[in-house]
Image: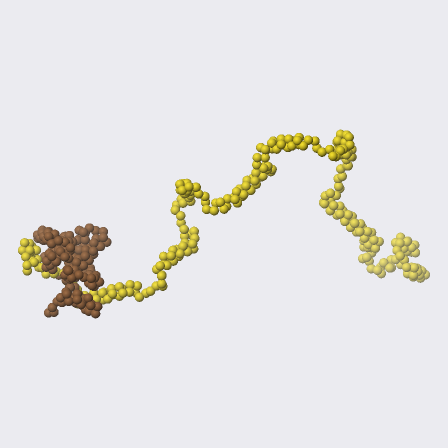
Amino acid sequence: MENRDWLNDYMSLKQINPANPFTVPAGYFDDLEARIMSRKNLEDIKNNAPEGGFTVPENYFDELTSNIQSRVTIEAAINGEAGFTIPENYFDELTSNIQSRIAIETAINEDAGFAVPEGYFDKLTSSIQSRIAIESAVESEETGFAVPEGYFEIFAEQVQSRIAIEEELGEPSVAFTVPDGYFAELSNNILSKTVNQESIVKRSGIVRRMFHSTAVKYATAACFAVAIGGGILLNQGSNPVNDHKNSFLHKQLSDLPVSDIKNYLQLNVDAGDTQQTVATDSAQVNDADLKNALQNYVDSVQ
Amino acid sequence: MPTEVDDAEILSKFQDEKTRNAAFNMLLKKYQQKIYWHIRRMVIDHDDADDLAQDVFIKVWKNLAGFRNDAQLYTWMYRIATNECITFLNKKKAKNNVSLDDVAYELADTLADSTYFNGDAAQRKLQEALLTLPEKQRLVFNMKYYDDLKYEEISQIVGTSVGALKASFHLAVKKIEAHLLSKD
C-alpha cells in the first residue's frame, strides 16, 4: 500500500498490528442505523412542532412580561413589611442622603435657571395667609395685644398731624353754653354726690348667719325630732292605766287568784276606802253601777 | 457482497422529498462505521462515541440539503465528526477543570478499564502513546494510520495546509516511536 510506505522508516511502529484494536458490543452496528433514524425522526418532530403541539393564547408572550411584573408587585404588597428589607444602616444614612440629593437637585436647577416646585404659585397665597395667621396667633399669645405693623413708628407723626389740624380748626364750636362757673362747681357737685356721700353712709354691721352650715340645720332638726318623740313617749307613759299596770301593787296582786282578793276585800275593806278610791282616781263613775255596788255592800253588811 | 452506493446518488435522492429518508438510510449504511471509529479513536469510550456518532448524523441530516458538491461527502462528514470530538474533549476539560495532559490521563484510564478493547500489548502501548499527543497530531495520525486518508483529504477535514499536516504527522510519529522504544 502506497500510503503506508512511511512505516518503513519507523520499525517499532511497523511491527504493531495495524488492525483496529477497539471493539463494539455485539450487534452494535446492526441497530445503529435504526437508532439514528429514530433519533432523526424525533428531531424532525421537534423541528416541526417546537412547542410539542401545545399552544398559548394569542399575544401571550407579548403580555407575559407585564403580567409577571404585576404579579411580583402584588406579591410584594401582600407580603408587606415582612417581605421587604432595607440595607443595613439605611435609616441612619437616609437624612444625609436626602440632603445630598436636595443639594444636587438644587445645583442642577440652578444650572438650568431658577425653578420652583410644581404648583408652587397655586399654593403660595394660601401658604402666606396661613403663615400670617400663625404669626398673628403667636404674637397675640406672647403679649395679649397687638398693634398694626409700624404703628409706633408713625404714632408721633399722627399725633402731631392731629394737633396741627385741631389748631387750624381753632376753638370748638360755641353754639352751646353753660352757666358761669358751671365747670368750677361741677367737680364739687360730682364729689359731693359720689365720694363724699359714701363717707357719710353708715356702714351696716356684719351679719353672721347662724344656720349657714347645712350640718347645723340637720342637727337642729334632729334635736326637734328627739324632743317631740320624747314628749310623746312621756305623755304615753304617764297614762293612769299604764301607771297602774306598771305599779308594784298591780304586779304583786296579778299573781293572786281573784277569789282570794274578793275574800280579802270582803273581810277588810270598809265604805271609806271605796270613796277614797273613787275620788283619787277621778275616773268616770257610772252612777248606776255605783248604786248597785253600794247596795251590794249594804246588803252584804246587813 | 453488495456494492457501495455512490455519494452522488445519495445526494440526488436526498434532494427529493419522497426519497429523502431512503437516501439517508443509504448514507448511514455507507458511513456509520467509518464515522464511529473516527470518533471512537478520539474519545476512546464506546458510550461517548455512540452519543457523538448519533449527534454527527443528526447534524448531517439537518445540513445535508445545503451541502455543496465542491467537497467530498465523506470529508464533509469527517469534518463534522472531528469538530464534535474536539468540542466534546474541550467540554470534558472545562467540566473537570483539568489540563490537556489530565484529559490524556483520564482517557488512558478509560482505555485501561475498557471492556471493548481486544488489542495486544503492542497495540495498547500504541494507544497510550497516542494519548500523549496533542489532539491535532492524534487526529492526523489516526486518519493517516487507520483510515489511510491522503493529506489532501485530511487537509479538507481539519482545515490545515498539507505541509503543516505533514509536519504534524511526522512529529507525531517520532513521538510515538520514541514512546514505544522507551517503553521497550
Please state the horizontal and vertical placement of residue B77, each as a whole percent of the image: 17, 61
Q: Quadrant of residue B61?
A: bottom left
Query: Residue at the spot x=75%, y=33% of the render?
Result: A177
Looking at the image, which residue sits at the far right? Answer: A302
Q: Give the x, y percent position of residue A228.
A: 79, 49
Q: Relative to A144, is B53 on the left or the right?
A: left
- From where the camera sits, is residue B161 visible? yes
Q: Quadrant of the N terminus of chain B?
A: bottom left
Taking the spot 20% from the left edge, 65% from the top edge, the residue there is A36
Total labels: the figure holds 0
Front residue of A228/A14: it is: A14
Image colour for chain B is brown
Residue in the foreground of this view, choosing between A291 and A98: A98
Q: Is residue A194 left or right of residue A52?
A: right
Q: Residue B112, relative to residue A145: is it above or below?
A: below
Foreground pick, A285 / B65 = B65
Q: What residue is at 70 percent from the left and 33 percent from the top?
A: A172
Res. A296 visible in picture: no
Q: Position of residue A65 (x, y in %)?
A: 36, 57
User: Which colour represents chain A?
Assistant: yellow
User: Which residue is at a point 86% across and 59% down the rendered structure image?
Assistant: A262
Name the residue nearer the viewer: A283 or B135. B135
Q: Is residue A20 left or right of residue A302?
A: left
